[in-house]
Amino acid sequence: PLDDTKTVGENIRLAFGEIAAKVERFNQIGEEMANPDADFDALMEEMGKLQNEIDAANGWDIDSQLEQAMDALQCPDPDTP
């Protein structure tokens, strides 16, 4: 079932579950590192683990995979509620 509180793109992204969450967290860590009070060692360690897991799952290509899935399913624009 679709989640009516999410956009089309967000619903499709749910199908990619764990790997999408890892890519999202990786990107979030990059933003957190801009904070001068951040624990850089812990963030770098987490980022390294995530990078290895994302690499192993070919997760860096997730946006392209999402686009292909949406095209195949003939979905409306990803930002459509």
Image (cartoon, rainbow, N blue to C red):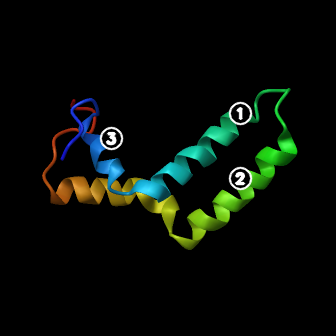
Q: Where is residue 66 in the image (x, y as percent from the top left)?
A: 33, 55
Instruction: Say few, some or many: other residues with alpha carbon within 10 Å of mark 1 (under 14 / 14 to 19 / 20 or more).
Output: some
Q: Which of 11 and 61 is in front in this view?
A: 11
Q: The disc labelled 2 sits on which kind of residue?
A: Met
N-term mark: 1 or 3:
3
**Residue placed most toward the observer, 2 or 31:** 2
**Dot label at residue 47:** 2
Disc 1 to disc 3, C-alpha distance: 23 Å
Quadrant of the image occupied by residue 55:
bottom right
Name which residue type carries label 3. Answer: Glu
Query: Which residue position is annotated with label 3?
Result: 10
Q: Which residue lies furthest to the left in this view?
A: 74
Give percent across and percent down for residue 11: 28, 44
Judging from the image, what secondary structure is the residue with disc 1 in? helix
Q: Quadrant of the C terminus?
A: top left
Q: Which circle marks residue 55 in the picture?
A: none
Pointer 1 and pointer 3: residues touching (CB < 8 Å)? Answer: no
Q: Is residue 30 above or below residue 13?
A: above
Task: Give the image location of residue 45, x and y in percent.
Answer: 79, 54
Q: Distance between the residues labelled 3 and 2?
A: 23 Å
Closer to the chain start, of discs 3 and 2, is 3
Q: Which residue lies furthest to the top in this view?
A: 36
Residue at image point 84% right, 37% down:
39
**Relative to 33, is 53 above or below?**
below
The residue type indicated by label 1 comes to Glu
Q: Mark 1 points at which residue?
A: 32
Q: Residue at x 41, y 55 (%)?
A: 17
